Image (spheres, grey):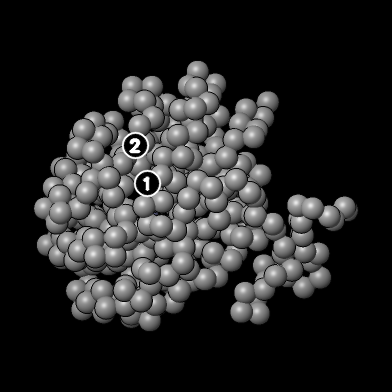
């Protein structure tokens, strides 16, 4: 039996996935597995950018072409916009990026400032993390925090300390990439706790099942963080299937794979639970600025809920 049989009829919200780095096959597989929405946080591209225009085009693609591409597979695409921690270390460029962020964070589909926070925990990272917390506060947007992979426990505590220092409500802050060492403090302090399922390393999904058994569903949400590296865009539906096989209730699964993320990011005013009552019609004959997901000669998939019979 495939995991797809276990989760048939469930819907999922992958609140951290870098679709720009993924293929149309991934979109189709995610849609087939019940992923109805994604959040794509702005991050680094695997190598450093050399100019502010590369950031400008990247942010524009997150609110434009990528959002359109997702819609062609029936998936709602949201994003968070921010200067990632690694590239905060190029201060001359970081200053220029800070100047263009306000041009993007108010656009349709932007549900927060992210992913921001610490990588190597340098002074420059701290400076731009603080500046972006202020930006989020001013805009009334949730914050999506990337926690460091090295010195994680201390880096996570420090990220939360600084957010509180800037007067952010913990209920507006999603602390991501948690593990068993960080989760208790994040929940105790009233923040949302995101968990990334990393294949072959760090947080596998059997560990995730144990975390949910221990802490319950409140303020916990799971994501794939799939990107251009070795990662799995189906991590969320697969983890839901594993939770179900291991006796976790459908209601708990729904909260940690769908509803908690909607609730947290709905504070942006850009998403609501009601949005998900209707599936979106897929019409692959549509174009975005003249471009389509189809290649010459391919037949568009057009699903109209009412009429067409093929
Ligand atoms: Zn990421």
Say which of 295 and 127 sits in front.
127
| Residue under pointer 2 | 219
Q: Earlier in the sequence, mark 2 or mark 1?
A: 2
Dot 2 surroundings within 10 Å: few (below 14), some, or many (20 or more)?
many
Q: Which residue is mark 1?
A: 264
- Vertical relation: 59 (above or below) 111: below
Q: Is residue 242 visible?
A: no
Q: Relative to 68, say whether 258 is above or below.
A: above
Residue 84, numbered circle: none
Q: Residue at x 37, y 46 (%)?
A: 264
Q: Does residue 307 show up?
A: yes
Residue 41 in the image: state x and y as whole percent.
40, 58
Kindly check if marks 2 and 1 are in contact, taking CB atoms under 8 A apart as contact.
yes
The residue shown at (77%, 64%) is 300
Q: Is mark 2 within 8 Å of ligand 1?
A: no
Identify which residue is drawn at 50% across, 18% down.
247
Give the total of numbered labels: 2
Q: Looking at the rendering, in which quadrant would you find the N terminus?
A: top right
Could you give the CA–CA distance between mark 2 and mark 1, rounded to whole angstroms? Answer: 8 Å
Query: Which residue is depicted at the point 55% across and 55% down?
Result: 76
Secondary structure beneath label 2: loop
Where is residue 40? Give x, y as percent: 45, 57
Picture quarter containing residue 281? bottom right
């Amino acid at each position: 039996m495939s995991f797809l049989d276990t989760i048939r009829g469930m819907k999922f919200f992958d609140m951290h996935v870098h679709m720009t780095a993924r293929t149309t096959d991934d979109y189709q597989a995610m849609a087939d597995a019940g992923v109805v929405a994604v959040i794509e946080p702005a991050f680094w591209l695997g190598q450093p950018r050399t100019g502010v225009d590369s950031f400008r085009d990247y942010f524009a693609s997150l609110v434009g072409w990528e959002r359109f591409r997702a819609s062609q597979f029936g998936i709602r695409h949201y994003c968070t916009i921010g200067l990632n921690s690694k590239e905060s270390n190029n201060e001359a460029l970081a200053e220029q990026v800070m100047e263009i962020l306000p041009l993007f964070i108010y656009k349709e589909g932007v549900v927060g400032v992210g992913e921001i926070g610490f990588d190597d925990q340098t002074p420059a990272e701290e400076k731009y993390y603080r500046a972006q917390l202020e930006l989020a506060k001013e805009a009334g947007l949730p914050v999506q925090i990337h926690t460091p992979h090295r010195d994680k426990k201390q880096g996570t505590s420090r990220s939360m300390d600084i957010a509180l220092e800037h007067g952010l409500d913990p209920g507006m802050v999603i602390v991501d990439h948690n593990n068993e060492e960080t989760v208790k403090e994040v929940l105790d302090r009233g923040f949302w706790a995101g968990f990334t399922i990393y294949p072959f390393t760090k947080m596998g999904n059997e560990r995730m099942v144990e975390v949910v058994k221990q802490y319950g569903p409140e303020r916990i949400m799971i994501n794939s963080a799939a990107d251009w590296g070795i990662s799995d865009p189906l991590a969320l539906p697969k983890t839901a299937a594993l939770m179900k096989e291991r006796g976790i209730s459908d209601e708990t699964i729904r909260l940690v794979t769908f509803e908690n993320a909607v609730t947290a990011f709905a504070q942006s005013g850009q998403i609501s639970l009601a949005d998900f009552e209707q599936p979106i019609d897929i019409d692959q004959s549509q174009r975005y600025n003249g471009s389509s997901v189809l290649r010459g000669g391919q037949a568009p998939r057009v699903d109209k809920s009412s009429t067409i019979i093929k």
